[in-house]
Amino acid sequence: MTFLNEIVAEFPDAISFAPGAPYEPFFADITVGPLLDTFVEARRAAGLSEDEVRRHLFQYGPSRGIINDLVAAALRVDEAIDVPPDAIVMTVGCQEALFLTLRVLHPPGASLAVTDPSYVGVLAAADSLDIAVHPVPDDGTGPDLAALRRASERERAAGRRLRALYVSPDFANPTGNRLTLAARQRLLATASALDLILIEDNPYAFTAASDDRLPSLKALDRDGRVVHTGTFAKVAVPGARVGYVVADQWVERRPGPPVRLAAMIAAAKNAVTLNTSPLAQALIGGLLLRHGGSIAALGAPKAARLRDNRDVLLDRLAHHFGEPDQPGAGVRWWAPEGGYFVQVELPVEADDALLRYSAEAFGVLWTPMRGFHLGPGGERRIRLSCSALEHEEIVEGAARLADFVDAL
């Protein structure tokens, strides 16, 4: 990621399919003062005094957060995830949500399974916590459940425990894959049989059309198997750095009564960031209130733009390289149903040196996929992100990519 940031800065005139960043013109409508006023007015209407509202915004806040009630209500309406506010912890982006969840769920001797390829952030978090990671192949239809069972059996035979599986069921980073409803149900059943927690990372589900939404794993969970993480980076403002984790499971503790897993995550947060910025939370709270308390409504215009961008990119890839998922073609590519990302397989290895050549000679940037893989499989694949570009940039960038491929 450091290399990608450096090369994007080094070639500012290149068309960049590299970053998974939101479309910046959406920020033009973000006015911080009025949004904070909206949040403050709602808190006053709920009965808080002037001093209490001021304290909420400007003092150290509770580790759990100050907009948990708004997030719980939105998840109930938008996702059919029905949990109380105290089952939610507001975090510094989804990255902290993942880090804290891994920290709490993985005592010494417990290991983590991840879909392979996987989001680099969860791999980095596991590495920093010294958690052993087991890759579970994903061929586009979901994690290989037989491989997951074998990993669990190996850990048990060695006197250890496979504690959780990280999975992104909707338009995953980097592949763009989405699990079918049947695949979600099979995964939940397997998690129950293996006594696994599923860590659901779902930042891209909002990009589906309203008539094409699938229930999240958490919405389908009837056995307390799913810890759900989310972020307002994609649907709102990444600079606010506000995410959340839904952890409503009850955990037995001796001595003392059972506590929610969220309480343990909040306690761990005390050792990391104490609390998520109340001002940043209030900004997000104001945005939610302006959109009827709905995350889906907040994300709808962004999702429509993303679908348009994806359609333009897929059309251009088909124009230059033929139909998607054609084995044996010089360039093979896959058409996702939503999200930010499209994966393309080149006829040669896609390493950092090739990326630099692409930037210098053809003025187009992309992301090598090898960094997302724990095992082999990503050597010749690249990730294209269309989220932050104008349509004409996508058209020109695809043409430059085709020229680059012709020169290989």
Image: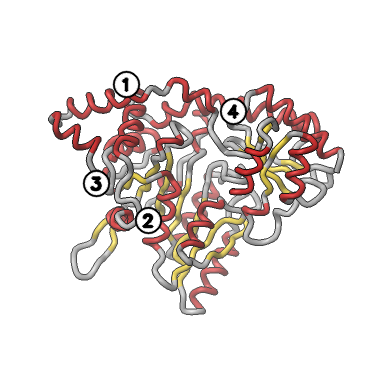
Q: Do we see residue 405 in this rendering?
A: yes
Residue drawn at (32%, 27%), measured in percent from left and top? 286
Q: Residue 62 carries which label?
A: 3
Q: For the residues labelled 1 and 4, say whether their Cβ atoms are less than 8 Å apart.
A: no
Distance in Å between CA atoms under marks 3 and 2: 29 Å
Residue pointed to by mark 1: 34
Which amino acid lies under the numbered mark 1 shown in the image of this protein? Pro
Measured as percent of width and height from the top left, residue 304 is found at 54, 25
Q: Do we see residue 249 in this rendering?
A: no
Q: Residue 182 carries which label?
A: none
> Between tags 1 and 4, which lies in front?
1
Distance in Å between CA atoms under marks 1 and 4: 30 Å
> Between tags 4 and 3, which lies in front?
3
Q: For the residues labelled 3 and 2, say whether their Cβ atoms are less than 8 Å apart.
A: no
Q: Residue 223 carries which label?
A: 2
Farthest right residue in view: 407
CA neighbours of label 2 inside 10 A, class few (<14), some (14 to 19), many (20+): few
Q: Which of 356 and 312 lies nearest the eye of the viewer?
A: 356
Which amino acid lies under the numbered mark 3 shown in the image of this protein? Pro
Residue pointed to by mark 4: 307
